[in-house]
Amino acid sequence: MDKGETYTVADLGLADEGALRVDWARARMPVLKALRDEAEKIKPLKGMRVAGCLHVTKETAVLIETIAAAGAEISWSGCNPLSTQDDVAAWLAREGYSVHAWHGQDVNDFYWCIDKTLEFKPTLTLDDGADLIVRVHGKRSEYAEGVLGGTEETTTGVHRLRAMGKAGDLRYPVIAVNDAITKWDFDNVYGTGQSTIDGILRATSVLIAGKTFVVSGYGHCGRGLAMRAKGMGANVIITEIDPLPALRAVMDGFRVMKMDEAAALGDIFCTATGMMDVIVKRHFESMKDGAIVANTGHYDCEINIEDLKSVSKGVRTIRDNNDEYTMADGRCIFLLADGRLVNLAAAEGHPSEVMDMSFANQYLALVRLAEEAATMDPVVYDISKEQDSDLATTKLATLGFSIDSLSPQQTAYLDDYTAGT
């Protein structure tokens, strides 16, 4: 472990490899580049101190560069024990950024890193899963007074923060970056779909075609994963608790059933719900020999690993991020990435192109908080429709596409309630 005054990383010697990764990502994130070029001129975050708790990946490094270019000081930790790219963390440390993150942390390490990012007394927080914000409101509440506002990247975190707001426990405003259309309709659907398949393939190298692929949850992430699995030739089953997405899955051509039924049919299982105990003991007991189990929801509690251990007589690591659990009757079940986010633990997370929009939203949300937080209530706010539209327009332009616009006559027609047949 390499430690300095402002960093704790696995190996500072990996920085050159990290630089190559960041170069690759930076070239594929044109929206953030445009924002960074503007930020360097006007410094909208000058005087701000940003504590970030978000996957330390090559894309996150480009976001950190952008926030720094806007004038902010930064301290960063990872939001998942297995998602940090050690070479990127090393590059950030070498470049002078404060970063405390390494791959393979235990729970104590994880929260130690978050606490280290808080020591420089942030004025803004940036979160993925709300662990940092909850920490500021709990065991490290002494730092809450100085925080103007925060942002949240993921569905699970937004759910936690809305619950805090509803209970009256939220002490500062938070912007739900996750709920921007340019985030969850692209990052969650297309990013999660592709990167989850990537993680499963890297950990197993199995053929997807012809397999029965069970996706738990048909929200944006589950839908994206189901689309990609179907596109690779899998027979996809959806499990759900909500009748509306379940019905949507049926209309999209998927079989929908309870997990108790799907458990005996699936070859590959992947949870995408944000809920605990989606796959438990009775499901493991009815799974096929050779079943593969993974998670692409935020926390590893979606798969009850203790239940899996309780019905196993032995475990061995077959390959990176792939553990074989042998049942008493000789069947084997393969758990990927210790039940953590398989797309980040076993692969590299979302492609840079889709994170370009998500992280542009993060940056713009921080700028809004720096300007307006003093007049905002301690509740969860949405990204504005105007910001969503502007980012989508910019992204289309960087991809070489353009769209029509309404003529004055068409605009007038929209508001003419007398118009009819």
Image (spheres, rainbow, N blue to C red):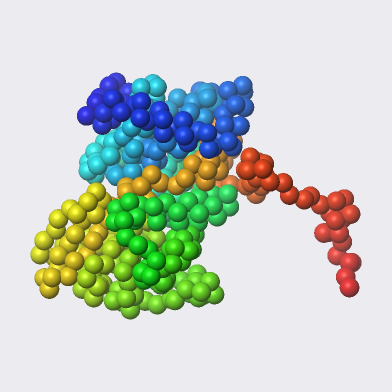
Any part of residue 123 in sight: no
What is the count of numbered marks?
0
Location of residue 261 (image quadrant): bottom left
Location of residue 285 (image quadrant): bottom left
258 or 228, nearer to the observer? 228
Q: Residue at x 40, y 77 (%)?
A: 257
7 or 287, nearer to the observer? 287
| x and y percentages locating residue 408 in the rendered image | 87, 50
Any part of residue 156 in sight: yes
25 is higher (above) or lower (below) than 343: above
Q: Quadrant of the N terminus?
A: top left
387 is higher (above) or lower (below) than 242: above
144 or 344, nearer to the observer? 344
Q: Which residue is drawn at 43% across and 67% down?
A: 233
| x and y percentages locating residue 223 in the rendered image | 48, 63
| x and y percentages locating residue 315 in the rendered image | 14, 58
191 is higher (above) or lower (below) than 34: below
**Left or right of residue 25, residue 301 in this image:** left
Q: Residue at x 28, y 39 (%)?
A: 103
Q: In which quarter of the image is the C terminus?
A: bottom right
254 or 50, nearer to the observer? 254
181 is higher (above) or lower (below) than 26: below
Q: Which residue is drawn at 84% across and 54% down?
A: 411
| x and y percentages locating residue 128 in the rendered image | 41, 45
